Image (cartoon, rainbow, N blue to C red):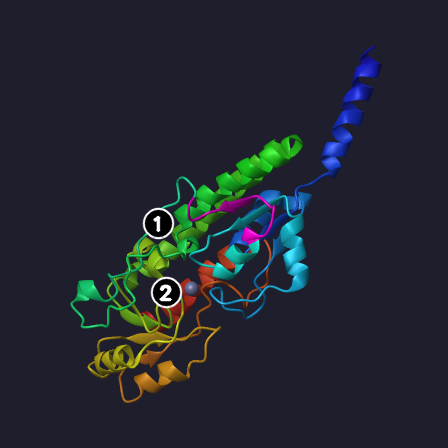
Amino acid sequence: MRYIISFLLASVAMPAAAELPRVVTDIPPVQALVAQVMGDLGTPVLLLEKGADEHDFALRPSQMRDISKADLVVWIGPELTPWLERALEGSPAPALALLDAEGTQTRAFAEGEAEEEGEDHDHGHDHGNIDPHAWMDPANAEVWLDLIAARLGELDPAEAATYAANAAAAKARVQAMDAKIASQMKPLADQRFVTFHAAYGYFAAHYGLTGAASLALGDAAAPGAARLSALSAEMKAGAYACAFPEIQHDPAVLTQIMADSPTRLGGTLDPVGSSLDFGAGAYEDLMRRIATTLQACLQP
Ligand SMILES: [Zn+2]
């Protein structure tokens, strides 16, 4: 009798174990978080390609098929990737939008970067929108690891404990990374700097960097002439220690407005990790590289 029951259990369990969830993700840091939760059980598909801009990307037909066959799409949300919102509208795949999820700490697109410092910028862009670059707050990464583990556990109950354990281990790694970056950033708290686009608000807020400004806006759209000349005047007046280009964008505009100013040209930032080796390590790699690049130029 016991033999028969265990035989029945085994034959019931086997097909479930073979059906691992097919997961599709939007950007490298999200793929990295899902990959850590899945561990040895599987590898999530990543849509954003090498060198691509997260705000402006065109899906290939094979990627549309990946989306339509997915058991789960994990993405930041339409605020970051409108190109994926359009694809999801026509797809039956269930989606987990992290920006909207319970527990995610969001911030408004920074009026802060211009207004709080009393600068005279063009405010045409400012709609109090949610800043979607929320992965740059490690506290959000920790919340998301648990959310991802819970959703995967619902899809694949046989492995729920594995997903939960993998998430717990990943959270410990994020915490260690966070402590290291916090100590790196501490001496830089008052340094003023310009980044190419407004992608670093969460990073700056989390690590107490009070002097971050940006050339382009939060969706990386090209800045207007008024903003360029205002920033150029500030740079000439010595307002910023460093300016950082981005890997997805031509640095020419930045170097042009920096001309004849004491502002130093920093290393190239990659806020979405599209130049990194994709996979489980990409989230921490992305965060560490931002910290190291800021530190290399800003260290007094
Ligand atoms: Zn961005």
Q: Amino acid at mark 2?
A: Gly
Nearer to me, 157 or 226: 226
The answer to whether 34 is drawn above or below residue 224 in the figure is above
Q: Residue at image x 39%, y 50%? A: 179
The answer to whether 75 is drawn above or below residue 21 in the figure is below
Q: Which residue is mark 2?
A: 218
Q: Name the dominant secondary structure of the magenta segment.
A: loop
Q: Is residue 70 left or right of residue 244?
A: right
Nearer to me, 60 or 167: 60
CA distance for labels 2 and 1:
14 Å
Residue furthest out toward the front: 90
In the rendering, at what x and y percent does residue 3 appear? 84, 15
Q: Amino acid at mark 1?
A: Thr
| Snapshot quadrant of residue 205 | bottom left
* Residue 95 falls inside the magenta stretch: yes
- Label located before the other in sequence (2 or 1): 1
Q: Which residues are magenta?
A: 88-100
Crowd around label 1: few <14 · some 14–19 · many ≥20 (10 Å) = some
Task: Mark 2 and ligand 1: say if the CB distance to the nearest ligand atom is below 8 Å.
Answer: yes
In the rendering, at what x and y percent does residue 153 appear? 59, 34
